Amino acid sequence: MLKWWTWQSKPTLYERRDEQKKGHGRLENRYYKCYDIHSKVVDERWLDMNFQTLIVVERKRKITNTGKKGCETCYFLSNMKTENVQTAHELFDAVRSRTYKKFLLQ
């Protein structure tokens, strides 16, 4: 769907690192980045969606009682243009709270 080399080479518009959270028997760190993408980044069949922003979330976790570590990267697409840091943080918060359907596709 995404042309990896195209968005990977773009500069990050906004970034955020959340404070470490402890809960459910684990420690978790989250790192958010958003990229401005345009129609050339997505495959032709997705052009009608008018995607504007790619949100990348990296989660690093450590299970407290075993010490086992893990890392996960998730990708979200939005047709909402990220014009300022406030918009970026709204998208990051939407992804975090799982209310992303409201913000990611308008």
Image (tube, grey):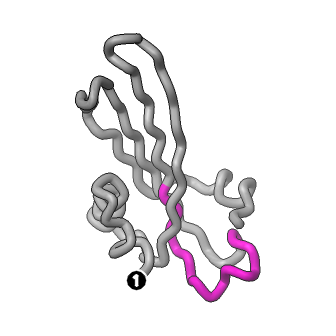
Please say if 2 is above or below 80: above
Identify residue for label 1: 106
Q: Quadrant of the N terminus?
A: bottom right
Measuring 52% from the left and 38% from the top, which residue is drawn there? 72
What x and y, as percent, mark residue 61? Answer: 41, 27
Measuring 40% from the left and 21% from the top, which residue is drawn there? 62
Read off the magenta span.
Answer: 41-55
Please say if 40 is above or below 9: below
Q: Is residue 84 magenta?
A: no
The answer to whether residue 85 of the structure is visible from this angle is no
Residue 81 is drawn in which quadrant?
bottom left
Measuring 52% from the left and 74% from the top, which residue is drawn there? 52
Residue in the foreground of this view, choosing between 87 and 63? 63
Secondary structure category for the residue under label 1: loop
The answer to whether residue 93 of the structure is visible from this angle is yes
Q: Is residue 48 magenta?
A: yes
5 lies left or right of 75: right
**Disc 1 residue type?**
Gln
- Furthest residue to the top? 66
